[in-house]
Image (cartoon, rainbow, N blue to C red):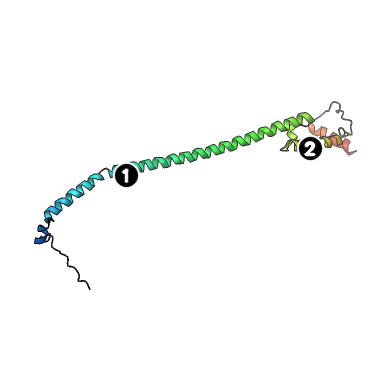
């Protein structure tokens, strides 16, 4: 079983062994080690002296990139909305032109046509025309459509006179 090694809790470096000096290895005193470590730490700290400034710049760049990305996303959304609006307007214009052509060919007012294709509009126009032909003329009027001669009195009196005549 290996024996546990004892650590030197003394703040000073252990005394150099006589054999170590003869072999060419050098031993250092605590003050020399402290100076070496201080020098080494100063060099390492010097490498990262501008770390805080670089970190701040990197954060600022990330924020600007995020803001730019957000602006890009907003611009993409606006572009998509405008494209949809343009497509809708183009479709409405195409339908208006299509209905106007069918209206001109058939004589049916374009406002009465609601179909989305030329064939459907033509069938719809034919149906409207056939319905209009079935109503052959104006409806018959009992009094022949002649205006009453010189109506006299107030509107209430005229109504009463009309009601008496209609009730007969």
Q: Quadrant of the N terminus?
A: bottom left
Residue at 15% x, 53% y is 34
Q: Secondary structure at mark 2?
A: helix
**Few, some or many residues within 10 Å of mark 1 (<14, 14–19, 20+):** few
Image mark for residue 46:
none
Residue 19 in the image: above or below residue 50:
below
Image mark for residue 123:
2
Residue extending farthest to the front is: 23
Q: Secondary structure at mark 1?
A: helix
Q: Nearer the viewer, mark 2 or mark 1?
A: 1
Residue at 82% x, 32% y is 158
Across the whole image, how many numbered discs are drawn on residues? 2
Q: Is any part of residue 17 visible from this angle?
A: no
Residue at 29% x, 44% y is 52
Residue 113 in the image: above or below residue 19:
above
Q: Which residue is mark 1?
A: 55
- Percent coordinates x, y for residue 55 in the rendering: 32, 44
- Percent coordinates x, y for residue 62 in the rendering: 38, 43
Judging depth in this view, the residue of 111 and 20 nearest the camera is 20
- Percent coordinates x, y for residue 157 in the rendering: 82, 33
Residue extending farthest to the right is: 168
Whether residue 9 sits left or right of residue 91 in the image: it is left
Q: Quadrant of the C terminus?
A: top right
Whether residue 71 sits left or right of residue 155 in the image: it is left
Q: Is any part of residue 90 visible from this angle?
A: yes
Label 2 and label 1: CA atoms lie apart by 73 Å
Judging depth in this view, the residue of 163 and 21 nearest the camera is 21
Splitting the image into 4 quarters, where does residue 103 fall?
top right
Splitting the image into 4 quarters, where does residue 88 fall?
top right
Residue at 73% x, 33% y is 111
Q: Earlier in the sequence, mark 2 or mark 1?
A: 1
- Percent coordinates x, y for residue 7 in the rendering: 17, 65
């Amino acid at each position: 079983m290996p024996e546990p090694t004892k650590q030197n809790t003394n703040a000073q470096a252990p005394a150099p062994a006589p054999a170590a000096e003869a072999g060419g290895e050098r031993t250092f005193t605590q003050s020399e080690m402290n100076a070496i470590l201080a020098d080494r730490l100063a060099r390492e700290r010097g490498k990262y002296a501008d770390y805080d400034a670089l970190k701040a710049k990197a954060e600022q760049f990330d924020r600007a990139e995020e803001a730019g990305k957000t602006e890009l996303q907003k611009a993409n959304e606006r572009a998509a909305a405008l494209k949809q609006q343009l497509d809708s307007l183009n479709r409405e214009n195409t339908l208006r032109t299509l209905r106007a052509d069918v209206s001109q060919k058939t004589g049916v007012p374009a406002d009465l046509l609601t179909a989305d294709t030329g064939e459907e509009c033509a069938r719809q126009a034919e149906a409207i025309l056939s319905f209009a032909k079935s109503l052959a003329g104006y409806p018959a009027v009992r009094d022949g459509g002649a205006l009453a001669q010189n109506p006299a009195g107030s509107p209430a009196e005229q109504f009463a006179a009309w009601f008496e005549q209609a009730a007969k």
